[in-house]
Amino acid sequence: MKGRFVSGAVLVAVPLALALLGPLFAGEPGPRGTSFTLGGGHWLGTDFVGRDVVRQILHGGRPVVVTALAATVLAYLVALPVGLCSALTRRRWLEEVLMRPLDVLLAVPSLLLILLVAAVFSPGAVGLALLVAAVNVPDAARIVRASAGEAASRPAVEALRMQGESWWRIAVGHVARSGVRTLAADAGTRLTGVLYLVATAAFLGVGVEPDAADWAVMVDRNRTGLFVQPWAVVVPALLIVALTTGTNLLFDAALSRKPAGAGRKGAASGHRDVPGGRGKAGPGRREVASGQREVESVREGGAPLREEGKSST
């Protein structure tokens, strides 16, 4: 696990540092040289119009990274409340209203939808982030809905409702917290998909200028000189691959960690299920004990629950 984390951190750090800090060290543009040449003071040669490839790489990462991160965050800002509402509501019609329109969007291929909108409007960088976020909302909301639905059916949720806890307390304090690992796994995969989708859209000229300093645009515009001056294509392509691969490795390493206290809880559960070694508790008692343990975990994670009066026996 440690090796996976270190590998992921290294793979992410290089393109991320170039994307965020590269423009600070790019300097002023120099005179243009001959297209697709090596040497002449250009460490990685020149691109299709004679610009320095190193300078284009230092400027080209920020649009890709910022757009992808913004689109991923926006997608979850919409998908989380929609998924939680549809999972926790007891009104069937509300769930249909929330989820069925997303199924229509889910049926349309993401890239095709982006190209259709781009054929009517010129989206720009902000518009591209909104488009990519919109096409990622449907499946993200369905994953949130599935994860939250399993947690919402537990006895602890019903116990919280009977104690008069607010919807926000139940949704965020218990249901959403129970699906953190599932959502984290999805976030790693989704960020990778968003990066490729943003890069593909930029490769096709959506949201960027034809000669913009963008890693995906560099791959597109310089591919005609791949066998003459390969660095103008290979380096930006490798940076995109390193960023996506490193992101997945980091999320995998984080998810492979054993939750704190899992061993103690398992041991305590075993003692409760087999008191004195004489036999296992019945299924009804185990379900009640499980619900009580979940309510206690919710109480430990936030504001204390209201105390209920104890009935005398």
Image: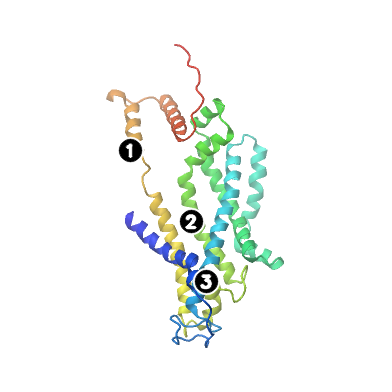
Q: Helix, strand or loop at disc 2?
A: helix
| Vertical side of 211 occupied by 289: above or below | above
Q: Position of residue 251 (x, y in %)?
A: 43, 54
Q: How many marks?
A: 3
**Residue for badge 1:** 263
At label 1, counting other C-alpha atoms closer than 10 Å, the crowd grade (few under 14, some 14-19, many 20 or more) is: few
In the image, what residue occupies the spot 56% across and 44% down? 145
- The amino acid type of the residue labelled 1 equals Gly
Q: Position of residue 96 (x, y in %)?
A: 66, 42
Residue at the top extreme? 313
Q: Helix, strand or loop at disc 3?
A: helix
Using the numbered discs, state the Cα–Cα distance from disc 3 to disc 1 in whole angstroms. 48 Å
Q: Earlier in the sequence, mark 3 or mark 1?
A: 3
- The amino acid type of the residue labelled 2 equals Thr
At label 3, counting other C-alpha atoms closer than 10 Å, the crowd grade (few under 14, some 14-19, many 20 or more) is: many
| Coloration mode | rainbow
- Most foreground residue, 54 or 151: 54
Q: Mark 3–mark 1 contact, CB under 8 Å?
A: no
**Residue for badge 3:** 59
Residue at the left extreme? 277
- The amino acid type of the residue labelled 3 equals His
Q: Earlier in the sequence, mark 2 or mark 3?
A: 3
Q: Quadrant of residue 7?
A: bottom left
Q: Which corner quadrant holds the C terminus? A: top left
Drawn side of residue 7 relative to residue 244, left or right: left
At label 2, counting other C-alpha atoms closer than 10 Å, the crowd grade (few under 14, some 14-19, many 20 or more) is: some
Q: Is residue 109 visible?
A: no
Q: Position of residue 180 (x, y in %)?
A: 47, 45
Q: Mark 1–mark 2 contact, CB under 8 Å?
A: no
**Residue for badge 2:** 189
